[in-house]
Amino acid sequence: MRTLPPNLDLFAVIILLGVAQGLFLGLFFLTGSRGRMVANRCLGWFNLALSAISAEIFLNYTNYTFQVLWTVDLAEPFNFVLGPLFYCYVFSRIYQRLPRRWGWHLLPFAIWLVNAVTWVYQPPEFKYNSYIDSWHPEIMYVPSGSYLDEDFTGIRHLINELTLVSCVIYAVMALLTIRRAGKSVATQTAARLPMLRYLSWLFALVPVLIVVVKPQFYNDLGDHLLASYIALTIYVTSFLVMRGSSFFQSEPPAKEAEAVGESRKKYEKSSISEEMEEAVLQKLNRLMADEKPYLQSDLSLPRLAAQLNTTPHLLSQLLNDRLRQSFFDMMADYRIREAQALLRDPATAHLKIDEIAERVGYNSTSAFHTAFKRITGQTPAQFRAAATSSRSA
């Protein structure tokens, strides 16, 4: 059997980086406290599926498949989990649960997985011919037989068309779910919709690329372009994760009393009028009561000031002079009050503590526990237990 030397170029590097980052991101969402959230599990498995598909394309594109013929078409069934996993991620990110009868969405994957047995269990010569047919049509076939009928469904030759249809259906379902949620969900959930909409449009571009790329190339020769786009989406997801992480946000001062005192000194010579302070304060109170921007995990002082049509300098002075609080103190107060309401509400009794933390704007469960204990003198679990006892008494 003739082989070719490895082909390593820019596309190969991009695809390999996407595979590595997808593996990292998948394991990140599936491990630790993050893995207890259903949305994170869906996103974790979604990224692992992307990595599996991209890894096979990397081997094919670089000619390393000649060295590992057993990997030929091994990742093909994962084409049919991308759509269901992405849709389940969007749905559970909004509603904190999987859609009803979610298992049925994995039926095409299950069928393709069973069908995969019939082509995985084939002689090396058969796999060699399959590989060169898709990626190196200039090479002559070698004589080969087959152990089994390679496709009991009779539709394997439609893999590209079926993948396209699956991606279109689930991209539309995700976008419709986001659209409906924008009219009905609570403020804290609505804050997530722009990011979900952005990711959904990125996913919706996959079938568009299939339509554009596939007709231009023989069989699978254009898959390196699709794998490069997959790498882009993986890194965009990583960027969004980092942007929303509390690790990269400013921390509140260690000595709160000193911070407030220093801030007051800073603004002692300011010429802000009491009328302006009162107007901004009233606007702040209305905004907090009506729109609850504090439930956004990435809310910052400049962003809040922009919503109030004022400057961060003026808003910081107002918080210190009139409320005797720093921005972080105020955020913690509002968020913990919201958490107390959720912990008391029987309708949200099924939510775990880390899900409560996320709903009220905390990316870190430990930070939520620390703030809750500091403000209430109890842990969230103790507060929920006391609230449950009082209801049943």
Image: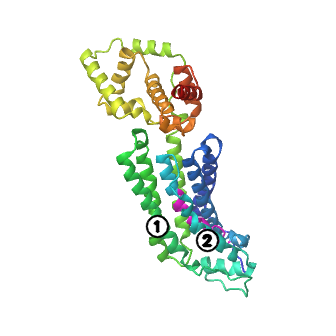
Residue located farthest toward the front when viewing the structure as drawn: 393
Q: What element does badge 1 sit on?
A: helix
Can you tell which of label 2 and label 1 is closer to the viewer? Answer: 2
Q: Can residue 75 be seen from the camera position used here?
A: yes
Of 237 and 340, nearer the camera is 340
- Under mark 2, the amino acid is Ile
Disc 2 residue crowd, few under 14, some 14–19, many 20+, Cα 10 Å: few
Q: Secondary structure at mark 2?
A: helix
| Chain part drawn in magenta | 72-85
Question: Which of the two residues, 387 or 4, is positioned nearer the viewer here?
Answer: 387
Q: Is residue 224 above or below residue 345?
A: below
The residue singled out by tag 1 in the image is: 207
Which mark is drawn over residue 116? none
| Within-10-Å neighbours for mark 1: few <14, some 14–19, many 20+ | many
Residue under pointer 2: 111
Residue 350 vs 344, above or below: the answer is below
Tell me the CA gap for discs 2 and 1.
Answer: 21 Å
Rendered image quadrant of residue 15? bottom right
Vertical side of 317 occupied by 27: above or below: below
Looking at the picture, how far across and down is residue 234, in whole percent? 54, 54
Q: Residue drawn 57% across and 33% down?
A: 365
Q: Amino acid at mark 1?
A: Pro
User: Any magenta on residue 81?
Assistant: yes
Q: Main secondary structure of the magenta part?
A: helix
Vertical placement of residue 111 versus 353, above or below: below
> Is 214 inside the magenta-drawn segment?
no
Residue 25, given in percent of the width and then of the height, sits at 60, 49
Q: Position of residue 54 (x, y in %)?
A: 60, 63
On the picture, is 7 further left or further right than 238? right
The x and y percentages for residue 341 are 46, 30
User: In the image, is 75 to the left or to the right of 188?
Assistant: right
